[in-house]
């Protein structure tokens, strides 16, 4: 499941790359709005959670014993990531390139390691 926050109130997913929705439709679930995160984390098929490492998401994931892939965006999320990865060992951290971008190959590598 991938939850995508739309850039406007009337989301059609048209902002995604051309053909993307069709390419993933048989491999996963693409959501364009809010989802009940606690229900998702408590579902037996949830094997991991890619998170920005905000405190609520961390607590919800840990309380449901769901390991995380950490993608911190700003502020305390970077410190939270270090604690989750190096300290508690409940997350793997994505690496940013020199332009502060996480590249597709990095995501694929971490997801493979995660599984």
Image: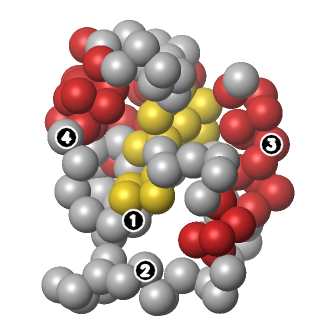
Task: Look at the picture and state if 108 lies above or below 55.
Answer: below
Could you tell me which secondary element the residue under label 2 belongs to?
loop
Residue where numbered disc 4 is placed: 36
Q: Which image quadrant is residue 114 in? A: top right
Disc 1 from disc 2: Cα separation? 8 Å
In terms of sequence position, does the residue under pointer 4 or pointer 2 come before the other? 2
In terms of sequence position, does the residue under pointer 3 or pointer 4 come before the other? 4
Disc 3 from disc 4: Cα separation? 28 Å
Residue 8 location, x and y as percent?
Answer: 24, 88
Q: Which mark is residue 4?
A: 1
Frontmost of labels 1 and 2 is 2
Task: Look at the picture and state if 83 lies above or below 49.
Answer: above
Res 62 seen here = no
Closer to the camera in the image, 39 or 65: 39
Residue where numbered disc 2 is placed: 13
Disc 3 from disc 1: Cα separation? 21 Å
Could you tell me which secondary element the residue under label 1 belongs to?
loop
Q: Are marks 1 and 2 in contact (CB under 8 Å)?
A: yes
Disc 4 from disc 2: Cα separation? 20 Å
Report the quarter where the C terminus lies.
Answer: top right
Q: Is residue 86 left or right of residue 20?
A: left
Q: Are marks 4 and 2 in contact (CB under 8 Å)?
A: no
Could you tell me which secondary element the residue under label 3 belongs to?
helix
Task: Look at the picture and state if 107 lies above or below 53.
Answer: below
């Amino acid at each position: 499941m991938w939850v995508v926050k739309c850039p406007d109130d009337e989301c059609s997913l048209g902002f995604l790359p051309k053909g993307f929705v069709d390419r993933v439709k048989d491999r996963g679930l693409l959501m364009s709005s809010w989802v009940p995160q606690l229900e998702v984390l408590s579902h037996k098929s949830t094997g991991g959670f890619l998170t920005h490492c905000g405190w609520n998401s961390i607590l919800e994931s840990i309380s449901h014993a769901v390991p995380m892939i950490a993608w911190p965006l700003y502020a305390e999320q970077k410190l939270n990531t270090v604690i989750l990865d190096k300290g508690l060992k409940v997350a793997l951290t994505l690496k940013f390139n020199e332009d502060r971008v996480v590249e597709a190959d990095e995501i694929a590598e971490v997801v493979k390691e995660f599984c």
